[in-house]
Image (cartoon, rainbow, N blue to C red):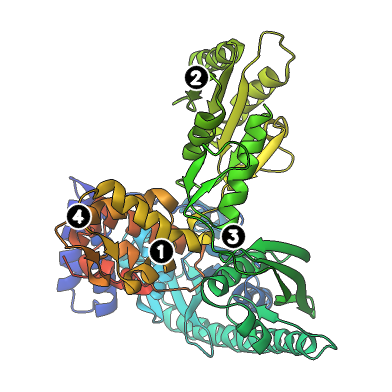
């Protein structure tokens, strides 16, 4: 296949694609992969494989594959062949090779641990095409979509879960030696089969271990409610099933999944349930033979269901009125109000769209006593001039008497600016009389953060997915706001679907959805068929980080484009068919196909 011709990369790729389709030896699998690569608008003239730090080597796939690959590496000795394991997203988890020249060549094309070799980024290649097609593939030389990969010959085989047959990743062999396609593919198939066999053994041992610990907990003298789970299995006894029902049931499972995902956590955790009750979870890990099989929870439910008011008033003055009655939200409001009234420096931590700014404005309105609220955004750049101007603004605002300074999104500040800000705030200054409030996202906050430690109080604002009981109240509030005249409401089925949504953008996304519905001529009652695609997510599967990002991108795209699937697919650089396939994968079911 000739090298790229003059002109744009996409035009050249289309011309080469036509040549591939005319080649009698071209396999349908390769032709289909080239078509997908063109739809993704992959640049054939340069390699662009994204990089993820710290790929997960603690997955069942990695634990099963690495010993097998290590043994194979010893057998291959000095052969110029590289062995690789990737996850189902195309992230290279492990690479083994003993030929120094091949190491340099693979590094030049970014075929190294942490880089993502999915077709979406790299076009037709052994790893990405095997994952996309679900079939063993041999991609040799000019069959690669990106020019820089055309010196390599790659044999890749998908690795499936031996029981559920879901895609876990791929095993890949790469060489520059020609004429070895048959040997490479036979070896790749053999090794992939060994890995699947080891995964079956590990999964069986893990599930047996978790089941045994679960049975031990259930058969103790006073078992009570018991829950055991990992990424693949959920077990609960009858005591838990009858004690925790409805929204409390979903809330408990969501919290338990998040706790179980942290293999280091053991101990006691208390969570507030939508009904107003508190679930005390005693968490133990199921560890056998050096492997973590999941978590076992002994559950104690405290209190009785409390029907909370729609409008929550704080413990001080009754002026703080915010929609929501879930225990997590009421606690955040009460703690924020108490810190504000005491004049303490306050750090509000929460995901984007959870209502941190709304909470600050409501509390300030109730307790301002004439104090002015000044909001300072993170600077658009951190050049010396911009940094100096921004720090001067913060210093001057703090010097104003009776001023409340709100520093928004401090997680966006670079390390250098954070250090400057920390020194500014920590330095005693008799003229600085203003109160300080900071907001940030939870993933960016650490316990040893000096800037965070300057605040006398820290409040966690809960995400909407943990506020099941507030969905109905928020829907009514936004309907009244955007449809003040005329009857409006939500059918029970539509409300139940809204309560099951993951809401990646939290309250802000819910408000946008209701605003769009209120402006459409859909009659008085909102029914399931009226809901936009981002509200019709029915999948509760645990997603990888890349899957969650991709799902959220699709949801936001549909929301921004008024549920137009075709336009969303075009803007995301994928075909309409691929868009529908991904929507089915993530449980996004549109009410109508636009």
**Residue beneath disc 2:** 383
The quadrant in which residue 348 appears is top right
N-terminal label among 2 and 1: 1
Can residue 2 be seen in this snapshot? Answer: no
State the SS at label 1.
loop
**Residue beneath disc 3:** 55
> Marks 4 and 1, Cα distance to the nearest angstrom?
51 Å
N-terminal label among 3 and 4: 3
**Which dot marks residue 486?**
4
Can residue 290 be seen in this snapshot? Answer: yes
Asked whether the residues under the numbered discs 2 and 3 touch, taking CB atoms below 8 Å apart as contact, a structural biologist would say no
Q: Is residue 381 above or below residue 577?
A: above
Residue drawn at (49%, 21%), measured in percent from left and top?
A: 374
State the SS at label 2.
loop
Q: Nearer the viewer, mark 4 or mark 2?
A: 4
**Residue beneath disc 1:** 118
């Amino acid at each position: 296949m000739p090298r790229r011709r003059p002109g744009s990369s996409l035009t050249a790729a289309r011309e080469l694609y036509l040549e591939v389709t005319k080649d009698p030896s071209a396999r349908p699998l390769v032709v289909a992969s080239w078509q997908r690569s063109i739809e993704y608008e992959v640049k054939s003239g340069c390699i662009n494989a994204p990089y993820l730090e710290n790929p997960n080597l603690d997955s069942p796939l990695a634990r099963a594959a690495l010993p097998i690959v290590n043994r194979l590496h010893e057998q291959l000795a000095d052969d110029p062949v590289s062995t690789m394991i990737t996850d189902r997203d195309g992230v290279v988890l492990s690479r083994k090779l003993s030929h120094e020249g091949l190491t340099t060549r693979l590094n030049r094309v970014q075929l190294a641990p942490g880089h993502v070799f999915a077709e979406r980024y790299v076009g037709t290649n052994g790893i990405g095409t095997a994952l996309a097609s679900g079939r063993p593939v041999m991609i040799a030389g000019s069959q690669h979509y990106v020019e820089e990969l055309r010196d390599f010959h790659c044999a890749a085989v998908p690795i499936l879960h031996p029981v559920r047959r879901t895609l876990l990743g791929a095993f890949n062999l790469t060489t520059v030696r020609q004429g070895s396609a048959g040997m490479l593919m036979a070896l790749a198939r053999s090794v992939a089969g060994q890995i699947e066999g080891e995964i079956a053994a590990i999964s069986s041992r893990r599930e047996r271990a978790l089941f045994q610990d679960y049975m031990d907990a259930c058969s103790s003298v006073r078992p009570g409610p018991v829950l055991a789970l990992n990424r693949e299995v959920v077990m609960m006894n009858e005591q838990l099933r009858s004690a925790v029902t409805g929204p409390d049931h979903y809330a408990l499972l969501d919290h338990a999944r998040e706790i179980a995902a942290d293999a280091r956590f053991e101990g006691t955790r208390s969570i507030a349930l939508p009904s107003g009750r508190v679930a005390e979870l005693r968490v133990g890990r199921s560890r056998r033979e050096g492997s973590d099989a999941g978590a076992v929870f002994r559950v104690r439910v405290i209190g009785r269901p409390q029907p909370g008011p729609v409008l929550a008033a704080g413990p001080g003055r009754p002026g703080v009125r915010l929609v929501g009655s879930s225990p997590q939200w009421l606690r955040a409001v009460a703690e924020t109000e108490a810190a504000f009234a005491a004049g303490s420096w306050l750090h509000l931590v929460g995901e984007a769209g959870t209502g941190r700014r709304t909470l600050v404005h409501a509390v300030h309105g109730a307790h301002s006593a004439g104090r002015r609220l000044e909001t300072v955004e993170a600077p658009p750049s951190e050049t010396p001039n911009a940094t100096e101007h921004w720090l001067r603004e913060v210093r001057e605002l703090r010097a104003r008497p009776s001023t409340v300074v709100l520093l928004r999104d401090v997680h966006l500040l670079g390390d250098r600016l954070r250090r400057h800000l920390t020194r500014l705030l920590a330095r005693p200054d008799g003229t600085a009389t203003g109160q300080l409030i900071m907001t940030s996202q939870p993933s960016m906050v650490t316990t040893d953060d000096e800037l965070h430690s300057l605040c006398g109080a820290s409040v966690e604002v809960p995400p909407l997915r943990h506020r099941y009981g507030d969905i109905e109240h928020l829907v009514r509030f936004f309907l009244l706001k955007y449809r003040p005249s005329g009857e409006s409401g939500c059918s029970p089925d539509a409300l139940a679907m809204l309560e099951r949504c993951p809401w990646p953008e939290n309250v802000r996304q819910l408000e946008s959805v209701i605003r769009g519905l209120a402006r459409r001529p859909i009659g008085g009652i909102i029914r399931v068929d009226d809901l936009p695609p981002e509200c019709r997510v029915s999948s509760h599967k645990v997603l990888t980080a890349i899957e969650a990002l991709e799902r959220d991108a699709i949801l936001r795209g549909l929301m921004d484009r008024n549920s137009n699937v075709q336009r969303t697919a075009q803007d995301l650089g994928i075909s309409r068919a691929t868009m529908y396939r991904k929507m089915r994968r993530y449980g996004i079911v549109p009410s109508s196909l636009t």
